[in-house]
Amino acid sequence: MQDSTTAIPLNQQLVLVTGGARGLGEHVVRAFLREGARVIVNYLNSAQAARTIEESSAGRAMAVQADVSDARAVRSLVEQAQERFGIIVTTVVNNALPAFSFNGELRPHADTLTWDHLQQQFQGIVRGALNTTQATLPGMEKMGFGRIINIGTNLFQNPVVPYHDYTAAKAALLSLTRTLSHDLGPKGITVNMVSGGLLRTTDASSATPEDVFNLIAASTPLRRVTTPDEFADAVLFFAAPWSRSITGQNLVVDGGLVKN
């Protein structure tokens, strides 16, 4: 068992990134690979993109299809990966996003929002994070070490576009982040969130008009929109030894637009 005051370097870790084949998830996967980690590239529909990452990783990435809202499929994913690499999953990045487009014109408004809209986001975001946590927990407990990193949003603090369903699910994930940190801290497992704003550019933000990007850039101290690569580097921080005494926190990475 690991000493609770120590941490495992990134190049000795096995990392699960859900929704890791494209968009922000791909950038997170490639950031971990750059640092020498072994990475499980979870995907639902993006098989070719996941295989492309695997084939270019010199054996350090493994593409595995699984619906994160299916607990049995997630357990199977973890078992396959641990058998393949011969080590325990040390870090989970809960990034998977149910089908969603950041298009303010087409979003459900207060009079058209349905429980189905909300449930779709809760199933993928909250249930998915619960499933990955429970599937990897036995191994993390055995090691006395683990890192769970949930991907959030700055729309909690600044709902500039009121995406009701998406923001409600991410807010619930933030609450789960904080409560899990209390349960899992004594086991040497930290639970944190990294929250972004609009990123330039991912699949989800591809429908965003250029005027919106420009408006957000002008509102930040850095006068630019955060990139997926910059966001991915912040995710690395919570998996790295430098953050070993940090848990239950929400780090906002948006160029200073929102002060947490």
Image (tube, rainbow, N blue to C red):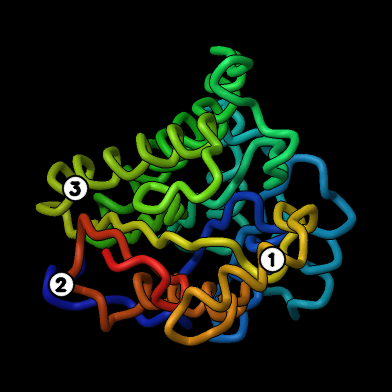
Q: Residues within 10 Å of mark 2 (few under 14, many from 20)?
A: some
Image location of residue 249, percent across then percent down: 24, 60
Q: Secondary structure at mark 3?
A: helix
Q: Amino acid at mark 2?
A: Ser
Q: Secondary structure at mark 1?
A: helix
The answer to which of marks 3 and 1 sits earlier in the sequence is 1
Contact? badges 3 and 1 (CB < 8 Å): no
Q: Amino acid at mark 1?
A: Glu
Q: Is residue 239 at all visible to an observer of this figure? A: yes
Image location of residue 55, percent across then percent down: 83, 71
Q: Nearer the viewer, residue 115 or 183?
A: 115
Image location of residue 232, percent across then percent down: 54, 73
Residue found 58% across the figure and 13% down from its top: 114
The residue beneath circle 1 is: 26
Q: Nearer the viewer, residue 85 or 153?
A: 153
The residue beneath circle 3 is: 184
Image location of residue 178, percent across then percent down: 21, 46
Q: Residues within 10 Å of mark 3 (few under 14, many from 20)?
A: many
